[in-house]
Image: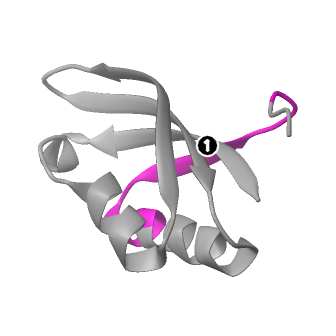
Amino acid sequence: MRKRVRLTFPQHLIKEPVIFRMATQFNVMPNIRRARVTETVGEMVLEMEGGEEDLARGIDYLKAQGVQVELVEGDIVE
């Protein structure tokens, strides 16, 4: 299963390996589709692939870390 999400990282998380930790801890394969980082915020469109439960737990993990997560619909082709 694949999901595409738009992530917004607060300043204190910009240099932290949040995506790596999520990927290894929850068996999710990330694919960065677009990213932009400034001194105050990080933005990313991330495609995530994995089991349905793993993806849900990975998204919950990101939210718990303080990352804003928005689902991007309609542009994933299987």
Is residue 70 found inside the magenta-colored segment of the image? yes
Image quadrant assignment for residue 11: top left
- Which residue, as the protein is rendered here, is positioned at the far front? 78
Q: What amino acid type is highlighted by mark number 1?
A: Val
Residue designated by label 1: 5
* Residue located at (20% from left, 50% from top): 13
* Residue located at (55% from left, 50% from top): 69
Residue 36: x, y in percent? 34, 19
Residue 16: x, y in percent? 15, 52
Q: How is the image coloured?
A: one colour
* Residue located at (30% from left, 31% from top): 42
Quadrant the N terminus occupies: bottom right
Give the magenta range.
Answer: 62-75
Is residue 4 found inside the magenta-colored segment of the image? no
Relative to 9, 72 lies left or right: right
Quadrant the C terminus occupies: top right
Would you place residue 42 above or below residue 23 in this image? above
Relative to 10, 62 lies left or right: right
Residue 5: x, y in percent? 61, 43
Q: Secondary structure at mark 1?
A: strand
* Residue located at (33% from left, 43% from top): 9
For this rendering, which residue is in front, 9 or 58? 58
Dot 1: few (<14), some (14–19), or many (≥20) neighbours within 10 Å? many
Count of numbered labels shown in the rendering: 1
Residue 72: x, y in percent? 72, 37
